[in-house]
Image (cartoon, rainbow, N blue to C red):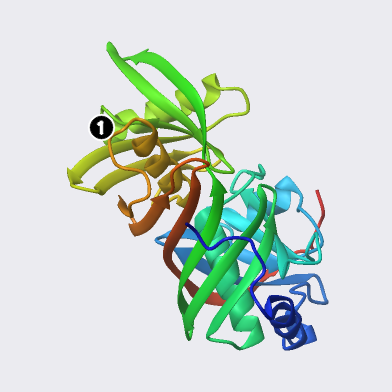
Amino acid sequence: MGLGLQRTPGGRRLERELWQRTPPSARSTASMAGSIAFEKYEGLGNDFVVLEAAGPLSTELVTRICDRHFGVGADGVLIVGPAAHDGARARMIVQNADGSRPEMCGNGLRCVALHLAKQAGVDRAEFVVDTDAGPRRCKVERRDDEASVAIDMGRAERLGEYRTTFDGREYVFERVSTGNPHAICLDVFPDLATIDRLGPQVSAAIPGGTNVEFVALREPRAFDVVVWERGVGRTLACGTGAVATGAALGFTGRVPLGEPLAIRLPGGTLEVSVGVAPFETTLRGPARRVFGGIVAGRLTPA
């Protein structure tokens, strides 16, 4: 089940070679003369600015970069930096468009994995990336600026239920952690206007906030999902949310554990698998480099 975090034969050698093959100029996007070089990536329309730095950036800088009218425009910034332990290729730090720092981002990690493979000039690679939710093994199959990336997403954890009444109707949410916290509604699929009002209310009611998903069954083992993401709002896709949805469906007996599921989000489809206890999970989906550029400013740390 999953890609596993066990080191494959030659895995350490591959990670070392990937790093050695990365041009020194590509290991840092901070440029001279008060400008920042960046790369723009997307995974099913969940879009990110990718840049390299030693740690998180100031909220002011992140919000300015993510502003869709006066900045580059993105759902968040993905910071690629030195690995936190010997077995990893790099570290990913995620900052949402409002500057907040979630623990994990599945769509973002696929983009970072493609970014690292491009830097190394390889079409196929397997390596570990450190995240705030722990190490995650990625398997990349790349063609130019696009890739299919499979990720070992770790264990899903069931956190209980949250119930609320909204506009005279009761909503029951299964709470699941997949590195990020999620609250998934499996029985009611409201319209988008309702989701835009209910999502932030549910998120605010749970300590620390949570992402909120609404799920509709369209055909066996294929589900439509709309996500309201903390720190961002309603998004086109959410990788950890797709995995959490698969886990919630399995935990509640709506689908068998261990079978692949198609999670269809507004931006496209992700393949999710959730194993039987201890509920190891995997995620597979696309990533694409959109463009690169320069934005005025300096890499101001948080």
Residue to which mark 1 is pinned: 189
- Give the vertical position of 204 relative to 43 (above or below): above
Residue at x-position 33% and y-position 19%: 171
Residue at x-position 41% and y-position 48%: 242
Amino acid found under the numbered disc labelled 1 = Phe
Image quarter of residue 108:
bottom right
Q: Position of residue 90 (x, y in %)?
A: 72, 67
Q: Position of residue 89 (x, y in %)?
A: 72, 70
Closer to the camera in the image, 235 or 153: 153
Residue at x-position 39% and y-position 54%: 272
Query: Is residue 29 shown left or right of residue 247?
Result: right
Counting every numbered tag in the picture gives 1
Residue 80 in view (yes/no): yes
Closer to the camera in the image, 33 or 2: 2
Q: Position of residue 290 (x, y in %)?
A: 48, 74
- Give the vertical position of 202 relative to 26 (above or below): above
Closer to the camera in the image, 264 or 167: 264
- Give the vertical position of 168 relative to 143 (above or below): above
Q: Position of residue 30 (x, y in %)?
A: 78, 72
Residue 266 in view (yes/no): no
Residue at x-position 53% and y-position 32%: 210
Q: What crowding class fits label 1: few (fewer than 14 Cα within 10 Å), some (14-19), or many (20 or more)? A: some
